[in-house]
Amino acid sequence: MELLFTSTYYASYQSVADRCFYIDFGHKVVKVSFCQLLSLRYKAKQLSSHDHLEYMLTHCDVTLLTFCDKEHIIVLDTLQVLDFAELIKGTFAMIELHTALAV
């Protein structure tokens, strides 16, 4: 496994041999395909939107992140949501960089 990106709370890895990615949430490491990673990018954009963060700050302190066909459920507070969005953005930046260097 090759480390792609680390944020304050999380880390992402790529396994060329397994042709998949791993996201380390600290207490849980989740194996995801590239399609699932794309889905997580969409969810990260939704969760880190201004409206959702404002809703979290005024009505509730946590949000649920479900993925991999609801096989995994992660509870995130506001700082963790922002950090998760940073992790996903950094992961895709590193994937693009690896792709550009390989060509």
Image (spheres, grey):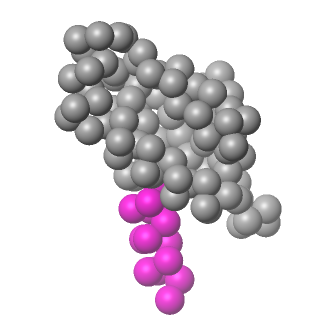
Q: Residue furthest bottom?
A: 103
Residue at image point 23% right, 11% down: 58
In the rendered structure, does residue 84 fall within the stretch colored magenta? no
Total labels drawn: 0
User: Closest to the observer: 99 or 82?
Assistant: 82
The correct choice, above or below, for 95 with respect to 24 in the image is below
* Residue 72 found in image quarter: top right
Residue 25 showing in the rendered view? no
Q: Position of residue 79 (x, y in %)?
A: 34, 22
Q: Nearer the viewer, residue 70 or 38?
A: 70
> Which residue appears farthest toward the right when viewing the image?
18
- Which residue is rendered at x = 29% and y = 10% of the image? 59
Q: Indicate the quadrant where residue 1 lies.
A: bottom right
Residue 36 seen by the camera: yes
Asked if residue 18 is positioned above or below residue 6 in the image, the reply reads below
Q: In the drawing, does residue 1 fall left or right of residue 79?
A: right
Q: Over which residues does the magenta segment extend?
A: 91-103
Q: Is residue 54 above or below residue 71?
A: above
With 79 as the anchor, is 91 left or right in this view?
right
* Residue 19 at x, y percent in the picture: 73, 65
Q: Residue at horizontal 68%, vertical 28%? A: 28
Assign the magenta stretch its main secondary structure: helix
User: Residue 36, position in %: x, y?
Assistant: 61, 54
Q: Residue at x 42, y 71 (%)?
A: 97
Query: Foreground: 26 or 84?
Result: 84
Could you say where residue 76 lies in the image, as x and y percent from the top left? 46, 22
